[in-house]
Image: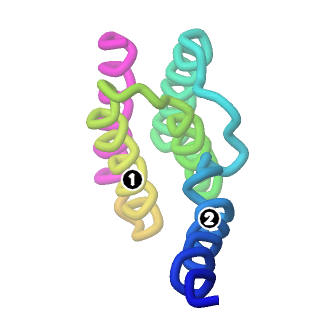
Amino acid sequence: MHLLKKYLLPLLLALSVNALSPMATATAAGKTENASTEEVRQALVDSVKAAEDALTALKSGASEEAVNEHISNARQLIKRVEINRLDVIRTRSAESLKKARQALNNGQKDLAEDFLANALKGFKEMQSVF
């Protein structure tokens, strides 16, 4: 009985904790595999198009909601790019999109335009690097 308490019970407890550990099944929500090269290229093309659409909509005087929709679309599309060497550029560009949306919501359209142009420049840089 002493051996059971001292060795077997902690062993069973450790095994049960490891069996239920979330690290054993850790994957991103909804993600089953890494994106292929073609999918990454297409995500980059789609992201550039969405950023260009946002910049065009802002310059043409479209409503804030329409421009915000394009910005949100670009931010979602760029999340599909999961290449380590592009992470820094992707993060910087996504942050520029976020700042553009914030500037637009604050009524600073010129600043939003600058941030959108910066994000678009980053997306095009990612395309050339990739």
* Residue underneath mark 1: 100
Q: Is residue 130 above or below residue 8?
A: above
The amino acid sitting under disc 2 is Leu
Q: Is residue 96 above or below residue 54?
A: below
The amino acid sitting under disc 1 is Ala
Left or right, 107 with respect to 44, comes to left
Q: Residue at x 59, y 15 (%)?
A: 36
Q: Residue at x 47, y 67 (%)?
A: 105
- The residue lying toward the viewer, choosing from 82 and 97, is 82
Q: Is residue 43 above or below residue 110?
A: above
* Residue underneath mark 2: 15
Residue 36 badge: none
In the rendered image, residue 114 lying in the magenta stretch gets the answer yes
Q: Quadrant of the N terminus?
A: bottom right
Q: Residue at x 67, y 64 (%)?
A: 20
From the image, state whether disc 2 or disc 1 is nearer to you: 2
